[in-house]
């Protein structure tokens, strides 16, 4: 097992604390308590390549010039993930079809049925680069299944801490990889606490989708793919589910990196969809009444019920920097949108429905103008429910 910290030598990209400036070879968080970031963001030289000639056959690894892991292709832990479809949400609909007036990126067609594979491939690649022998993760289901699957691909042992009431389909997906699921009673925060106790034992590496910067480097590839499919242009806005901010912050990192590289000319507005009743970002932006409407907690969106996201300061920074926003979606609105999605041929899991539902709310409130160009990721497969 690689040391958690130590002198910085040649090898995997070092990590740096954005708050105190400390630098580490590897560690799951800074000693000051802050989430860490990669010390360097790789950037290719401008200008952007001809999108028609750009070779995307390696999936998300086609954008390796932006990735701080996997310099040696032999270290990459991959199942061919990425290059998910970007489709017109309303194409082929009849007179009664829902009018989303947006593009959907079908993130539910990944190998494990969710966008979390973006982060799992880069996180397990970093684990391999560091010589890790065992990883642990805590998850409500999708991230755990992704980490377990890519750990199996890498030949690395895995333990996944999950809520006691996790869906059996997701538990099965973890078990079938040979990983060890650990069911924890209590809240989602109790699951994390139990996992961190395991990390403190010192013989396992924390492959966290909430803390590990390698995970966010992977979800940043969502932005690269969107821009590529649009001939290196970006939409006016992107609406994503928002729990720990795994995809939301990945999109922020990715669009910023592309602009810094001179491949695109701006960053889109980033808009988040939270679960009503468990909406800390909405509470921070708009107060408790907006976060906790009278019509109860949105239990349908269990995948984003995160009361204390560890990256909330960075999420709020992304919203402020891009003139973004966040709304809380009720269970009734999410379930209504889920029915619309299924009827239109998008077989997704319930948490996915919050982003298209939020899109409607943003339009009704004038946050998104009628003529604005919007991309919405659909993040998890209905086959997992």
Image (cartoon, rainbow, N blue to C red):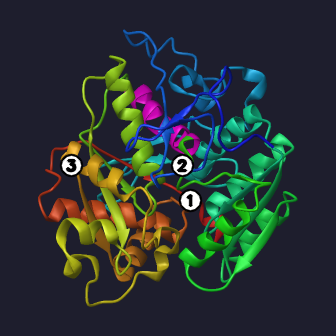
Q: Is residue 345 visible?
A: yes
What is the spatial separation of the Cα atoms under label 1 and label 3, in whole angstroms? 27 Å
Q: Residues within 10 Å of mark 3 (few under 14, many from 20)?
A: some
Q: Which mark is residue 107?
A: 2
- SS class, disc 2: helix
Q: Left or right: where does residue 152 sit relative to residue 266?
A: right
Sequence-wise, which precedes: disc 3 or disc 2?
A: 2
**Residue under pointer 1:** 380
Q: Left or right: where does residue 355 sit relative to residue 84?
A: left
Say whether marks 1 and 2 touch (CB < 8 Å): yes
User: Which one is nearer the viewer's eye here, 51 or 243?
Assistant: 243
Q: Left or right: where does residue 155 sit relative to residue 282?
A: right
Marker count (numbered): 3
Residue at image coords 20%, 82%: 289
Q: Nearer the viewer, mark 1 or mark 3?
A: 3
Is residue 87 inside the magenta stretch?
no
**Residue under pointer 3:** 320
């Amino acid at each position: 097992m690689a040391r958690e910290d130590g002198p910085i030598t040649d090898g995997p990209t070092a990590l740096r604390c954005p708050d105190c400036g400390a630098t580490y070879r590897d560690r799951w968080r800074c000693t000051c308590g802050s989430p860490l970031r990669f010390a360097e963001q790789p950037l290719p030289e401008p200008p952007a390549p001809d999108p028609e000639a750009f070779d995307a056959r390696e999936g998300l690894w086609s954008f390796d010039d932006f990735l701080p892991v996997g310099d040696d292709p032999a270290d990459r832990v991959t199942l061919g993930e990425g290059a998910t479809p970007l489709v017109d949400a309303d194409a082929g609909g009849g007179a009664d079809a829902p009018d989303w007036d947006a593009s959907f990126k079908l993130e539910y067609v990944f190998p494990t049925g969710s966008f979390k594979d973006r982060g799992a491939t880069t996180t397990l690649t970093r684990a391999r680069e560091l010589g890790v022998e065992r990883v642990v993760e805590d998850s409500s289901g999708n991230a755990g299944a992704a980490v377990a699957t890519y750990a199996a691909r890498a030949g690395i042992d895995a333990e996944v801490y999950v809520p006691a009431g996790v869906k059996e389909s997701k538990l099965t997906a973890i078990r079938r990889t040979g990983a060890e699921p650990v069911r924890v009673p209590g809240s989602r925060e109790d699951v994390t606490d139990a996992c961190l106790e395991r990390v403190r034992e010192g013989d396992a590496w924390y492959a966290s989708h909430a803390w590990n910067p390698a995970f966010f480097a992977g979800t940043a590839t969502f932005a690269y793919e969107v821009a590529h499919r649009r001939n290196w242009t970006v939409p006016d806005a992107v609406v994503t589910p928002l729990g720990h901010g795994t995809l939301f912050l990945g999109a922020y990192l990715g669009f910023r990196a592309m602009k810094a590289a001179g491949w695109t000319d701006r960053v889109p507005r980033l808009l988040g969809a939270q679960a009503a009743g468990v909406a800390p970002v909405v509470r921070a932006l708009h107060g408790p009444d907006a976060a906790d409407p009278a019509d109860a907690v949105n239990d349908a969106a269990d995948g984003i019920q995160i009361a204390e996201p560890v990256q909330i300061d960075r999420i709020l920074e992304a919203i402020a920097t891009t003139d973004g926003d966040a709304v809380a979606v009720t269970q009734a609105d999410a379930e209504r949108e889920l029915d619309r999605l299924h009827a239109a041929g998008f077989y997704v899991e319930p948490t996915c429905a919050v982003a298209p539902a939020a899109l409607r709310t943003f339009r009704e409130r004038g946050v998104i103008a009628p003529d604005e160009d919007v991309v919405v990721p659909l993040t998890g497969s209905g086959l997992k429910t």
